[in-house]
Image: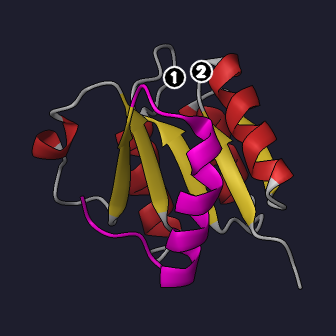
Amino acid sequence: MTKATILVVDDDQIEVLLSTTWLQNAGYEVLQAASGDEAADILQTGTHIDLVLTDWNMPGSRLDGIGLAKLAGALHPKLPIVLRTANHEAADNLPSVIPPITIIYKPYSPKNLPELVGRLLKQGISSLR
């Protein structure tokens, strides 16, 4: 059985390291990107990605998490997106043009990521809000 590949995107390298560690320990392949722009490059190469786990706010990047979700949705309409944010009102401010996403709010425990990722992959597409 092929391992699912998760693209972890965050400008905070500690978040990337923690998420990567928990996901790899659960058996997932993990690709990392330090910005929305870097993640966009990976998505546009045609590399197989099963789920994107991205931060919402990434200063210094042309694409934030919403922009990345829009691009990912345009390239891969059924690709599950998990958006991390500290903004607890974020779901109220989501543009309707992005693909369905799941929001997780910071702070959260990265040890819960494998269970969330597994559930979303079994569904085949993440739930909207």
Identity of the residue drawn at 64% across and 42% down? 111
Is residue 68 visible in the rendered image? The answer is: yes
Residue 51: x %, y % from top left: 60, 62
Quarter of the image for residue 27 reads bottom right
Q: Mark 1 points at which residue?
A: 61
Q: Considering the numbered disc 2 on the image, is that residue within a helix, a strand or a loop?
A: loop
Residue 95 lies in the magenta stretch: no
Magenta region, residue range: 106-129
Q: Which of marks 2 and 1 is nearer the N terminus?
A: 2
Mark 2 residue type: Asp
Residue 124, visible in the rendered structure = no
Q: Residue furthest right?
A: 1
Which of discs 2 and 1 lies nearer the camera? The answer is 2
From what the image shows, is residue 28 above or below residue 106?
A: below
Element carrying mark 1 = loop
Q: 33 or 43, which is in the foreground? A: 33
Q: Disc 2, disc 1: CB below 8 Å?
A: yes
Q: Nearer the viewer, residue 67 or 81?
A: 81
Q: How crowded is mark 1: few (under 14 residues within 10 Å), some or many (20 or more)?
A: some
Q: Which mark is residue 11?
A: 2
Residue at screen point 46% across, 15% down: 59
User: Which quadrant: the N terminus?
Assistant: bottom right
